[in-house]
Image (cartoon, rainbow, N blue to C red):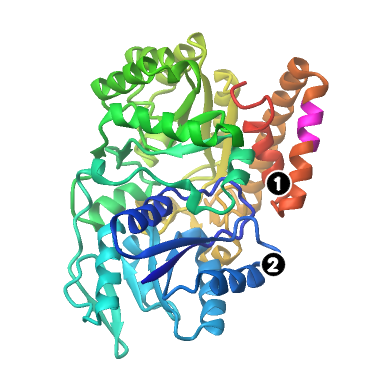
Amino acid sequence: MRIQIVNPNLSGDVSILDIGQTYLATYINQRTRHEAATMDFTFHRKDWQRYLARSLDRFEPDVLGISATSLYMHYVTDIIAEAKRRRPDLRVIMGGWHCSLLPDDSINRPHVEAIVLGDGEHTSEAYLDALEEGRPLDGIEGLWFRRDGEVVRNEKRRLIENVDVLPVPDYDVWEDIEKYVFYNQMLYFMGNRGCPYACTYCSEVSLRKAIPGKGIRRRSPRPLAHEIAQQYDKYRDAGMRIAHFFDPVFAFNLPWTREFCDEYKKIGMADKLPFSCFGHGENLDEERVEALASANCRIVRVGIEAGNERIRREVYKKQVSNDHLRRIFDLCHRRGISITGYNMIGGPGEDFGTVMDTFRLNRELHVDRPIFFTYRPLPATRGAELVEELGGKVHDEIWQEIDSLHTHGNVDTGKLRPWQIEWFRYFCLLYFNISRAGRLVADQKHRFFLNLLEYARRGIADGVGMHYVIGYFMVCAGDNLTH
């Protein structure tokens, strides 16, 4: 059987190189008798219908697999409808976070015949085997499907516990992989799956409740270091200048972190390729920062979330004080590690005073790359309930306009309207980006403008959203990557 796995990204965001989709396509190609290809709309927004037709004609799939996230569901609906219009006999199966958290909504979408709940590798293999052999789909764990208009809900499949058995992701399944590397200067890796924390805004908490199995699954750290070396040899000529870990909390386990860093140094990668990772405020300390810095970690991405401690602790349930943030930011800066700080504007219970606290704390901490999102209550999270409990309202009708966590706020906190939240976010972006641009120009002189012109030229040619061009240029392009 041939399955074409779709990345339904029509937003213009060039960072959506789906590592889960890469794992799935690689697994099908290397561990099963079936064949997988991808269909990626990231660089085909303006001619997506023609691109879809060309992709279907070239690969001739038996099954269309859709990777579904809640932000892109309106794109998912349009893409499936167009695919079925062109190939009425095409089977459609959907997987991803939206399916795992909202399975009834997912299976009842037009033309969707089956959905995968949880990890997709083993369930997809069993599904394709059954189709090829003409067997019924009953009993396939992790699969819901439609039969004669009725939904058959098979038992859920436990999450894959030993993630070491999965093959090394083959990024060549993405036909535009070199464009991704150009715009982001990095390739993505995964050392640990799952997160031990219970932040109210995060879907990880809901996923732990929805899918059985071990919540945190760690890869062996030494083979992970060698995987980075392997991918660097393959993609360095395309412009790979950093390895980025998508683990929710990379340095959660200190012995694991030390073992990875030791191996990364031992095989010489610390001298060749820096890396970046996500860190949690509760988890980062001097020992972890020292281990990361010794292996050439150049960027740690930390969720500040809110500058107001009450909002951060009581609403978001992130038990990190401002004083602790000051300490870890100082630790990182003294060891030469830049910090990307993530903030949400307009969360449950927020007013003008609390969002100003966020602005002031980012300024005080000297965040190297402050990122600001409008608060968006993701489906099936506690955060969605907290908005109304604290006197606000979620405007669900605005979801159809949303394809990013950056823009189009849909929360009224009771004291801040959506337009006020969005404009305050723009104010923060303008203030910090002007400040950052000034530092970059002072350091790079004319190179800053030459790099910006080249980045913008490529962005226009590739159909990338210009707000993403400017945003990602400031973060990772040219000489800005580790500044």
x, y percentage for residue 369? 59, 28
**Residue under the point 53% across and 49% down:** 16
Q: Which residue is denoted by mark 1 in the rendering?
A: 467
Is there CB contact under 8 Å for labels 1 and 2? no
**Residue under the point 30% across and 57% down:** 121
- Residue 393 vs 146, above or below: the answer is above
Residue type marked 2: Asp
Q: Which residue is denoted by mark 2 in the rendering?
A: 47
Residue type marked 1: His
How packed mark 2 is, by other alpha carbons closer than 10 Å (few <14, some 14-19, many 20 or more), is few
State which region is magenta: 448-453
**Residue under the point 67% across and 45% down:** 468
Q: Main secondary structure of the magenta part?
A: helix
Q: Please give left or right for residue 290 compared with residue 407 in the image.
A: left
Marks 1 and 2 sit apart, C-alpha to C-alpha, by 20 Å
x, y percentage for residue 138? 19, 77
Q: Residue furthest bottom?
A: 148
Q: Residue furthest top?
A: 334
Of helix, strand and loop, which one carries label 1?
A: helix
x, y percentage for residue 275? 47, 26
